[in-house]
Image (spheres, helix red, strand yellow):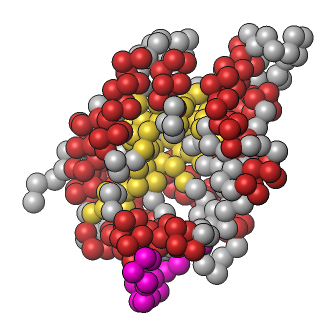
């Protein structure tokens, strides 16, 4: 068998701090920090954490706080958010938080920003937000960037310390109008996933066509994100997808996103037809295989999208298998820590 071609673009990691059956949320957060150290040793380019509120299976509710822990535990890898959901927050507070991170870890902090609001009415009320607050994302983004440059005009005489004069690279997650907003602002676009590729390609084309250079970025920059599972065999790699796929199926059929369960336990279940359909749908559309298979699939995706970087995420019950998946891909891709 011919070895796969090394990765053609930088590879980065997104982790959602998934909880696991029988373990508490503190363990999930510690696992995220440990994974970041692992990713740095392996040579991955960035390590990002996410924002979720009121989700039983996710511990990552405060991304800037978790990013601070990750940055303090690592030395070289870029650290950021994928992302902070800007409609949930006041832009000045977000600027101050990232300003502190950038002051403590200069040259290593990324500010990934999304436009989603709390997932349920109850969560939105608890956050003091409404569903249509997502429509203000473009306005909030402009204000946020203005706090870093000292050019915001909404609050004369007010300054965000220590953010002002300390710009942090911003990235826009492509949900809804995100691609257009990223293009207009002259910021990098983060878009997923390997599902619905036709829509993804159209959004990327629109972004590149509408892109306006900015002080941060002279030309379009596209980060494609998606799930990648790697193991010694194709079957073993696909089993890594089972815990997350069942969690997704469970939330669609029962309305609650549960902690990750062992693959053997899930595969032994007698699923209802509705659960089975949702599970099979959740298992589809990801990259899963041996190191060479996964790398070939990634390079193919990069060739089709013209991506400048790939942001991969892997969620599975067994943390040892999770770490090994990232190690196998890094070795195949020729990464160097």
Left or right: residue 50 compared with residue 176: right
Please provide percent x and percent y for residue 274.
Answer: 43, 76
Quadrant in which the N terminus is drawn: bottom left
Residue at the image position 38 percent from the left and 73 percent from the top: 277
Please provide percent x and percent y for residue 149.
Answer: 71, 13
Count of residue discs? 0
Left or right: residue 298 compared with residue 12: left
218 or 132: nearer the viewer: 132
Q: Is residue 264 magenta?
A: yes
Residue at the image position 59 percent from the left and 27 percent from the top: 170
Q: Is residue 187 above or below residue 258?
A: above
Quadrant in which the C terminus is drawn: top left
Please provide percent x and percent y for residue 329.
Answer: 34, 55
Q: Is residue 120 above or below residue 170?
A: below
Residue at the image position 53 percent from the left and 12 percent from the top: 214
Please provide percent x and percent y for residue 218.
Answer: 45, 13
Q: Is residue 236 magenta?
A: no
Q: Which residues are magenta?
A: 258-275
203 or 34: nearer the viewer: 203
Q: For residue 56, say whether it is visible.
A: yes
Q: For residue 37, say whether it is visible.
A: no
Of all residues, the one furthest to the right in this rendering is 157
Residue at the image position 37 percent from the left and 25 percent from the top: 206
Residue 85 picture quarter:
top right
């Amino acid at each position: 068998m011919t070895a796969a071609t090394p990765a053609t673009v930088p590879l980065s990691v997104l982790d959602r701090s998934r909880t696991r059956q029988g373990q508490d949320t503190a363990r999930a957060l510690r696992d995220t920090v440990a994974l970041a150290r692992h990713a740095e040793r392996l040579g991955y380019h960035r390590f990002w954490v996410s924002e979720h509120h009121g989700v039983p299976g996710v511990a990552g509710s405060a991304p800037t706080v978790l990013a601070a822990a990750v940055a303090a535990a690592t030395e070289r890898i870029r650290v950021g958010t994928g992302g902070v959901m800007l409609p949930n927050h006041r832009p000045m507070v977000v600027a101050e938080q990232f300003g502190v991170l950038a002051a403590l870890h200069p040259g290593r902090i990324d500010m990934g920003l999304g436009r989603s609001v709390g997932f349920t009415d109850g969560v939105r009320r608890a956050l003091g937000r409404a569903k249509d607050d997502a429509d203000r994302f473009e306005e909030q983004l402009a204000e946020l960037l203005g706090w870093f440059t000292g050019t915001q005009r909404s609050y004369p005489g007010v300054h965000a310390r220590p953010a002002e004069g300390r710009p942090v690279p911003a990235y826009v997650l492509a949900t809804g109008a995100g691609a257009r907003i990223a293009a207009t602002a002259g910021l990098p676009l983060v878009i997923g996933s390997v599902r619905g590729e036709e829509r993804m390609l159209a959004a990327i084309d629109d972004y590149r066509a509408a892109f306006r250079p900015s002080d941060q970025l002279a030309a379009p920059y596209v980060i494609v994100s998606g799930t990648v599972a790697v193991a010694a065999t194709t079957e073993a790699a696909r089993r890594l997808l089972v815990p997350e796929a069942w969690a997704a199926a469970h939330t669609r059929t029962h309305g609650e996103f549960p902690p990750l369960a062992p693959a053997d336990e899930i595969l032994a279940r007698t699923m209802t037809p509705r659960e089975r359909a949702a599970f099979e749908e959740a298992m589809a559309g990801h990259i899963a295989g041996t190191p060479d298979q996964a790398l070939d699939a990634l390079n193919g995706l990069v060739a089709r999208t013209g991506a400048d970087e790939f942001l991969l995420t892997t969620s599975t019950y067994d943390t040892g298998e999770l770490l090994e998946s990232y190690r196998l891909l890094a070795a195949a891709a020729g990464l160097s820590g």
